[in-house]
Amino acid sequence: MTLEQLQKYLYKVYSKETCYPSCRDGWSINNPTLGHCAIVSLLVNDYFGGEIYKIKVNGISHYFNYIDNNVVDFTSKQFGMMIDYNNRVKKDRVEILRDEDTLLRYNTLKMRLQLIFEDENIYKCNLCNDMVEKFPNSKTVSVGKRNDIVILGEAPANNGWRKSGVAWYDINHKLLPSGVVLQKLLDEINLKIEDTYFLEAIKCYPKDRKYLNKCSEYCKKYLFKQLEIIKPKVVLSLGDAATKSILDIKYKKFSDVVGKEFDINGYKVIPIYHPSPISPKSYNGNIEIFKNIKL
């Protein structure tokens, strides 16, 4: 990876949640680097070494990197002006990370960056080529505001969140019927759909349901790698196929495992009925499960 590639990847993961708290009201997709200088300088240091420095720009503290006698400043555009890098002060990364908010934002941005890298590995996979259709958008995770809960689906539809960019919403940013049911359930634990991460057990669109088992087998290593990166407290698996993709136990009926807790690689996995309104158990079959979820 080059510096230019890292800079490109970072533009995919900047967000209001990773922005410095006092700058969040001014953050927008038109000024994505705002409030990110400290944690970006840490990430550049992770991948390319060098030193981290701090200066004042119009009285505002600003961090950047110095690598091989060159200034590397990925967040300078937030100021919209030329920056004088003289009078810089070298900073220790351990000192920067003593601040709990900085540590949290750094870990969040790093996690999302790692998910982008994993997406690229997934998109290069060709084990299921004859069984699936790939998407021009290689994104296989819908990012939430917090990583307490990962919702695990079966496989992507031919449209849906891959096109809208956000799980449970259509391309007009309207909450889908399944999303309406899921939000009612999440209300029980005071979460919004936008708070949760969403993954599919199968990463590409299967051409036929007969391929589900084989595709799930091939995708399992990628699924567990994504969970390793996100480190959720709870994984909610939607329906039978998604549940079988993550549980190593055998069961006769899906209802035998619904609502039960399983420890898989340190994650608490809870199978639930799919929240699709066409299922009679989408809400009533899940409500008691959600009332008992502890984060």
Image (tube, helix red, strand yellow):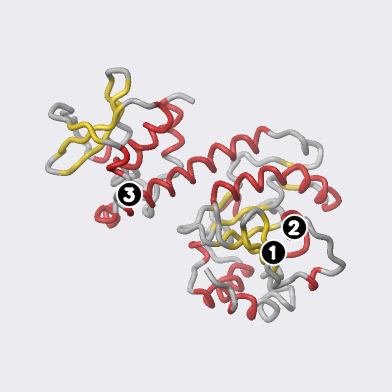
Instruction: Kindly state the secondary structure of the residue where label 1 is placed.
Output: strand
Q: Indicate which disc residue 262 carries.
A: 1
**Where does label 3 land, which residue?**
102
* CB-based contact (under 8 Å), mark 1 and mark 3: no
* CB-based contact (under 8 Å), mark 2 and mark 1: yes
Q: CA distance from mark 1 to mark 3?
A: 33 Å
CA neighbours of label 3 inside 10 A, class few (<14), some (14 to 19), many (20+): some
Q: Amino acid at mark 3?
A: Thr
- Camera-nearest residue between 113 and 282: 113
Instruction: Kindly state the secondary structure of the residue where label 2 is placed.
Output: loop
Q: Nearest to the eye among marks 1 and 3: give it.
A: 1
Residue 17 located left or right of residue 180: left
Where is residue 253 drawn, in percent x and y? 84, 69
CA neighbours of label 1 inside 10 A, class few (<14), some (14 to 19), many (20+): some
Mark before the other along the chain sequence, 2 or 3: 3
- Camera-nearest residue between 278 and 213: 213
Mark before the other along the chain sequence, 2 or 1: 2
**Where does label 2 land, which residue?**
247
* CB-based contact (under 8 Å), mark 2 and mark 3: no
Q: Amino acid at mark 1?
A: Phe
Where is residue 252 drawn, in percent x and y? 87, 67
